[in-house]
Amino acid sequence: MDVLMPQLGETVAEGKITQWFKTAGDVVKPGDNLFEIETDKVSMEVPATAAGVLAEIRVAAGEVAPVGAVVAVIADGAGAAAPKQASASAAAPSASQPTRAASAAAAANPATPAARPIEIDPFFEVRTPARNYGPARLAGGRSVTPLARRLAAEGGIDLARISPSGPQGRIVARDVEAAARATATAPPRSAEGLSADAITAIYRDVPLREMPLDGMRRAIANRLTQAKQTIPHFYLTADVEIARLIALREEANAAAPKDKDGNPAFKLSVNDLLIKAWAVALQRVPAANAVWAQDRILRLQHSDIAVAVALEAGLIAPVIRQAELKTLSAVSNEMKELVARARAKKLNPSEYEGGSSTISNLGMYGVREFAAIINPPQATILAVGAARRQAVESEDGGVAFTSVLSVTLSCDHRVVDGALGAELIAAFRELVAQPVTMLV
């Protein structure tokens, strides 16, 4: 049985194997983790789907292979011969020169579902019939291959300044690589144009440890830099009284049913209630429950709330689908499961792609307030700070203390203007101040 590089998301064309959990000759069972894969979006472990012996590893740790490529072979345990570890140079398909092994091997083994055929073009990245990874057009009629476009984005190279060497005036990967080398060797003219070597030289006498960027951290840097530069952000900050929200949480947790061992069926957090309130607020202001789609705005029917989760390698935002329709206990239990699976690198693309809006909560770190960067194509993100006790004027003119937290709403002005953003944050404040209204 051939083990293929899996498809992890609609726009992912290749993956990097960061480590193997098994070696050639090991017996594997269905569900055993074989290897860890890293793409520009996520890092996760890939399990075996059949029992046998790991007869051959074709893509070594640290190497990149296209989606659908054969990365290993599992032989029948009864007839498996002593396997040999394939060398990286002889057996592993590279990112720049993929092979047709995935299609051929699947066709030769009728017991295995056939892999989707992979087309090969020396000036294109790997592509499948269902997706178009053809060249993008630039100003002036020039085009650029997807691989060259990705390399330029990762290296901060301006494609408009590159002289193409590909057929029909096409910018190919070697053009970007040549521009990157020229940039690295050219003397820096300003602090913004410093190369990595020039910056490192500044700190040559300072004790330090270099931390190479992995795929996730690089993707986060590129994506958020692009978001900050291209999305017209504006920010709205408000204080929200949460005394009744806290009381509802405590009452609900105290009344939670318990199993025979005395464990509660759920345990609500403040963040669970804020997720529910944000989902309902987006339903009450449907014009703000929308995303930017370049030449149009997409208004969404349901509130799919993404929640930022910090990982060791970066950040990911799993999505609670149709959160406005779910009970508080369902939101709480689903959130706990998503966080656990995110930290174990076991999320599926469908669990972190899309979403109506995102919540980022740094209150547990004592951060009073902050402004978050919008995660495109979403048009809003809600930043939640720490709760605090604050003196407020009571209805009888006296002074009382209550629990308050600050939230900052970041808006994409192309989708949500000032008045609409104010309406949305006002709806959220009302729901949090009177939390029983989000349950009816």
Image (tube, helix red, strand yellow):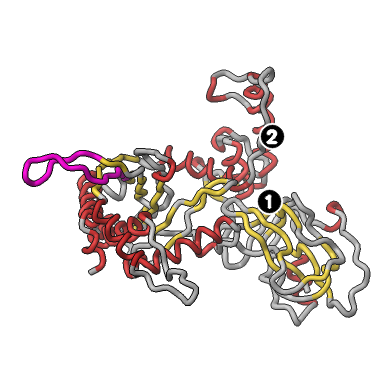
Instruction: Magenta stretch: give its range.
Output: 390-409
Graded by Cα atoms within 10 Å as few (under 14), some (14 to 19) or many (20 or more), the crowding at tag 2 reads few
Q: Residue 435, image x and y in percent?
A: 24, 60
Nearest the eye: 84 or 100 = 84
**Pointer 1 or 2: first along the chain:** 1
The answer to whether residue 213 is magenta is no
Q: Which residue appears at 57% of the width and 18% of the height?
A: 189
- For the N terminus, the quadrant is bottom right
Residue type beneath disc 1: Phe
Q: Which residue appears at 22% of the width and 54% of the height?
A: 433
Discs 1/2, front: 2
- For the C terminus, the quadrant is bottom left
Q: Is residue 321 above or below residue 411?
A: below
Nearest the eye: 187 or 417 = 417
Q: CA distance from mark 1 to mark 2?
A: 16 Å
Q: Which residue appears at 42% of the width and 67% of the height?
A: 266
Q: Which residue is mark 1?
A: 123
The answer to whether residue 399 is magenta is yes
266 displayed left or right of 158? left
Res. 185 visible in picture:
yes
Residue type beneath disc 2: Ala
Res. 297 visible in picture:
no
User: Do the residues under discs 1 and 2 have CB atoms within 8 angstroms?
Assistant: no
Please tell me whether mark 2 sits on a helix, a strand or a loop.
Answer: helix
Q: What's the mark number on residue 178?
A: 2
- Give the residue at the far bottom of this rendering: 111
Q: Which residue appears at 65% of the width and 64% of the height?
A: 6
Q: Residue 110, image x and y in percent?
A: 76, 81
Q: Quadrant of residue 411?
A: top left
Nearest the eye: 389 or 20 = 389
Dominant SS of magenta comes to: strand
